[in-house]
Image (spheres, grey):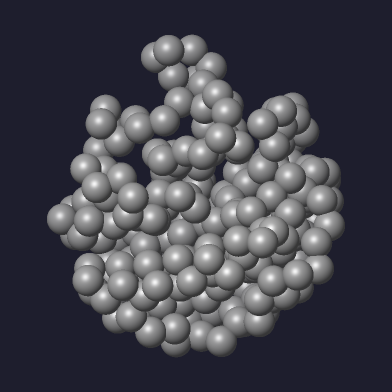
């Protein structure tokens, strides 16, 4: 199964983000990929006061476009879910199969200050969610990956009792989908880079689960930035990067799992 990753700008403008994601879908289609992974908040922008109306409109556009292209999606966006408690702001990866069927969403569990009011730690309520990424979606000769979605901070093991990679390992995951959008452009970039690199390598080694990870190329607030990403985009297998994705600018890549 061929999964693509898109290291792309996540801006404040939903319409601009829609066009960016469409270009990524085109690239993934041209390269015969089955699923495309996008960064955290790639549709809505990673903004506490994101425009839900524009995001709803943009999502409908992306859903239809991906369906026409037969491209499965692991789409990072902020969202407003209707839940038992009412309308709840979520930071999530939305999973779609190659026929455009919505498979469900993985919500961010370990938030940071920038996430503000969204409800965290629903993993206690719903547990680890496994998404079966199938190709073809129906019929015989299916191939599949048991995917767990992790959003930025969810990958990092500083919540010992709620280590999502460990819980994913126990649940039988065969791939970790990691959508990231970290701070960058400050005097601690080197520290964060070392942390991200070491943990991605170690988690993939300890769990024996491959990781595909993508980051935003702009600042976390959606403003233009021309420096390196906060963490490397690409694929990590058993402690080693098997891709070599430049850390600046829009970059696309794929890996055959």
Residue 133 x %, y %:
38, 61
Outermost residue toward the front in this view: 187
Above/below status of 53 relative to 103: above
Residue 92 x %, y %:
51, 42
One can see residue 25 in this view: no
Q: Nearer the viewer, residue 100 or 208?
A: 208
Outermost residue toward the left in this view: 170
Q: Which of 183 and 133 is in front in this view?
A: 183
Q: Nearer the viewer, residue 151 or 187?
A: 187
Above/below status of 40 relative to 82: below
One can see residue 241 in this view: yes
Above/below status of 248 relative to 12: below
| Quadrant where the N terminus is found in the figure | bottom left
Q: Which residue is drawn at 69% across and 50% down?
A: 220
**Left or right for 109, reference 60:** left
| Quadrant where the C terminus is found in the figure | bottom left
Q: Which residue is drawn at 21% across and 43% down?
A: 161
Residue 149 x %, y %:
40, 53
Q: Which residue is drawn at 52% across and 27% down?
A: 118
Residue 10 x %, y %:
72, 53
**Number of numbered tags placed on the structure image:** 0
Q: Which residue is drawn at 44% across and 83% down?
A: 241
Above/below status of 92 relative to 82: below
Q: Nearer the viewer, residue 132 or 76?
A: 76
Tell me which corner region of the image, top left, top right, bottom left or bottom right, holds residue 55: top right
Tell me which corner region of the image, top left, top right, bottom left or bottom right, holds residue 52: top right
């Amino acid at each position: 199964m061929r999964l693509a990753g898109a290291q792309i700008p996540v801006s404040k403008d939903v319409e601009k983000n829609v066009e960016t994601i469409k270009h990524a879908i085109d690239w993934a289609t041209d390269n015969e990929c089955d699923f495309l992974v996008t960064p955290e908040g790639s549709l809505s922008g990673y903004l506490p006061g994101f425009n839900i109306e524009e995001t709803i409109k943009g999502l409908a556009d992306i859903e239809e476009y991906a369906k026409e292209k037969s491209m499965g999606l692991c789409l990072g966006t902020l969202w407003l879910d209707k839940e038992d408690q009412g309308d709840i702001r979520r930071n999530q990866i939305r999973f779609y199969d190659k026929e455009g069927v919505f498979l469900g969403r993985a919500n961010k569990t370990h938030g940071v200050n920038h996430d503000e009011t969204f409800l965290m730690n629903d993993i206690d309520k719903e547990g680890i969610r496994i998404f079966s990424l199938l190709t073809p979606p129906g019929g015989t000769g299916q191939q599949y990956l048991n995917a767990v979605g992790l959003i930025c901070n969810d990958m990092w093991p500083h919540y010992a009792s709620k280590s999502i990679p460990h819980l994913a390992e126990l649940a039988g995951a065969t791939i970790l989908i990691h959508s990231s959008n970290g701070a960058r452009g400050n005097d601690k970039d080197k520290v964060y880079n070392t942390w991200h690199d070491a943990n991605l390598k170690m988690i993939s080694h300890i769990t024996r689960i491959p990781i595909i990870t993508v980051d935003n190329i702009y600042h976390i607030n959606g403003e233009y930035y021309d420096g390196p990403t906060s963490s490397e985009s690409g694929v990590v297998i058993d402690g080693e990067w098997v891709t070599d994705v430049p850390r600046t600018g829009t970059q696309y890549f794929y890996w055959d799992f």
